[in-house]
């Protein structure tokens, strides 16, 4: 299960220096392979290849790019069970969820890029000229471990579709699925240099991508700290920066909602992917008069979670991805107790059934107040903060009292009432009554949750520049 080569200019090659890091299965803490970490010199080689390939790839026809994307989709579908298994092994997501969501959602992005590309108007006539959209150039991509294939695909697919070339740095914690995706792209016959993969850590490979003068755009999904660092490095060359960063999403349950049902759904949404989601509804806002009912419903929902071996199809929650992530979540659980929140379920330490692995007890706190750490910091683990409000204005104020603004959630049987609340939430996405994932609508954040958008038409246009052809006619 090694990832000891990088992919540059259509070839698998050894990275410069070849520092290695163990790949750990988070379910049992055993080494399952090794990843070779690239260097700034490797990034330079990859960017050179991408720059060389840009002229030809950017000049391809719509039909040629559609055909390449369709071959990627075919290859992806053929290897979907393997891709799901790799993600389960490298980052601990349960195999059922990995198959039904992690892998298939990534496939959706390639299908969506095809849908948009089929009819997209790259030129639009105006009375005095033409507005032309052109590929931005060489794109640097930095992606995380929590939804590895999804985040890679959400960047690679529109970049390929628009005629850009790219250098991808996946998370060094979860490199196996990235290698498999690179193999799929290679087998699809995407020309050499269009797609390049350099594994490595953020301070070395990520920073080399962000600062490279021949990279025209950098797209990062990660923490707010990582986004700030990338933006600062990119500023010297004034390249476009697209950021999808952290979140602290509020789930406002309005008084007319079915309280028990809404609370249970909110608990399960918070614990999806072991809580390792940037838009998880980690702050549940409940009318104060429903406090006791909501607490009881939350306890009942926690009891239905099946924590265990992620390779078991019956498991609904696996471990966190790493020891450092486990330690971070444990520290935040301890802070909730120390600051006086009411522990409803879960708590510190591993579950009694886990002798190894980075397993965390799914935890619910009640009576959380806005100044507590668990209400302000992104935990990135299965920890829910229940907060109580007396009026809808107070609920909105609490929801917006955060430096983040990635997503929001509203629960009510009355769509008009819910819409008024949704319009007031300062976030890039607001979900109504547990609406499912949508690959066509924009995804991105306000405030410290980033800038730019991914998915669908909005994500497609992130990879295009705008040119005005003045005085020309169509």
Image (cartoon, grey):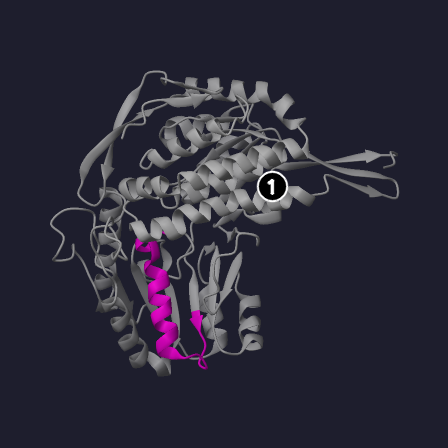
Please name whichever residue, 373 or 70, is drawn nearer the observer in this view of the structure. 70
Q: Is residue 161 visible?
A: yes
Above or below for 407 versus 236: below
Residue 461: x and y in percent read 63, 42
Please name whichever residue, 292 or 124, is drawn nearer the observer in this view of the structure. 124
State left or right for residue 212 relative to residue 39.
right
Residue 384: x and y in percent read 32, 63
The magenta stretch spans residue 254: yes
Residue 152 position by quadrant: top left
State left or right for residue 438 relative to residue 146.
right
The magenta stretch spans residue 307: no
Q: Is residue 221 visible?
A: no
Q: Residue at x 16, y 54 (%)?
A: 350
Q: Quadrant of the C terminus?
A: top right
Please name whichever residue, 188 or 271, is drawn nearer the observer in this view of the structure. 188
SS under mark 1: loop
Q: Quadrant of the N terminus?
A: top left
Q: Residue at x 14, y 52 (%)?
A: 354
Please name whichever residue, 262 or 331, is drawn nearer the observer in this view of the structure. 262
Residue 68: x and y in percent read 57, 32
Query: Which residues, given as a range, are shown in magenta?
Result: 252-277
Residue under numbered circle 1:
462
């Amino acid at each position: 299960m090694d990832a000891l080569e990088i992919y540059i200019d259509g070839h698998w090659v050894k990275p410069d220096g070849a520092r290695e890091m163990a790949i750990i299965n988070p379910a049992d803490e055993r080494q399952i392979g090794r990843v070779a970490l690239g260097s700034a010199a490797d990034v330079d080689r990859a960017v050179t290849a991408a720059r060389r390939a840009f002229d030809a790839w950017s000049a391809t026809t719509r039909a040629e790019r559609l055909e390449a994307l369709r071959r990627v989709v075919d290859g992806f579908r053929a290897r979907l069970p393997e891709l799901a298994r790799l993600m389960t092994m490298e980052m601990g997501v349960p195999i059922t969820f990995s198959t039904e969501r992690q892998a298939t959602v990534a496939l959706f992005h390639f299908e969506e890029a095809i849908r948009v590309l089929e009819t997209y108007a790259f030129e639009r006539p105006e009375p005095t000229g033409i507005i032309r959209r052109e590929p931005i150039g060489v794109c640097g991509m930095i992606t995380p471990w929590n939804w590895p294939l999804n985040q890679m695909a959400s960047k690679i697919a529109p970049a390929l579709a628009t005629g850009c070339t790219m250098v991808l740095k996946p998370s060094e914690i979860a490199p196996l699925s990235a290698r498999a995706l690179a193999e799929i792209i290679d087998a699809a016959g995407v020309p050499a240099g269009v797609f390049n993969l350099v594994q490595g850590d953020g301070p070395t490979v990520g920073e080399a991508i962000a600062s490279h003068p021949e990279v025209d755009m950098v797209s990062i999904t990660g923490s707010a700290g990582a986004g700030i660092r990338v933006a600062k490095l990119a500023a010297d060359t004034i390249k476009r920066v697209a950021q999808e960063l952290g979140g602290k999403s509020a789930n406002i349950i309005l008084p007319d909602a079915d309280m028990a049902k809404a609370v249970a759904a909110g608990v399960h949404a918070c614990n999806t992917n072991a809580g390792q989601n940037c838009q998880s509804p980690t702050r549940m806002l409940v009318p104060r008069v429903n406090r006791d009912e909501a607490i009881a419903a939350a306890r009942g929902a926690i009891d239905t979670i099946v924590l265990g071996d992620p390779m078991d199809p019956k498991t609904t929650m696996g471990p966190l991805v790493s020891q450092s992530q486990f330690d971070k979540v444990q520290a935040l659980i301890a802070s909730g107790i120390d600051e006086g929140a009411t522990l409803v379920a879960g708590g510190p330490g591993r579950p009694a059934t886990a002798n190894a692995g980075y397993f965390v007890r799914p935890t619910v706190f009640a009576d959380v107040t806005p100044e507590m750490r668990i209400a302000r910091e992104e935990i990135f683990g299965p920890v829910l903060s229940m907060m109580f409000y007396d009026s809808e204005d107070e609920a909105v104020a609490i929801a917006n009292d955060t430096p983040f603004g990635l997503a929001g959630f509203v629960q009510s049987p009355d769509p008009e009432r819910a819409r008024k609340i949704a319009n007031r939430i300062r976030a890039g996405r607001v979900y109504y009554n547990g609406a499912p994932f949508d690959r066509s609508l924009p995804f991105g954040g306000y405030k410290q949750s980033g800038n730019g958008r991914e998915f669908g038409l909005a994500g497609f246009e992130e990879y295009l520049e705008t040119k005005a052809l003045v005085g020309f006619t169509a």
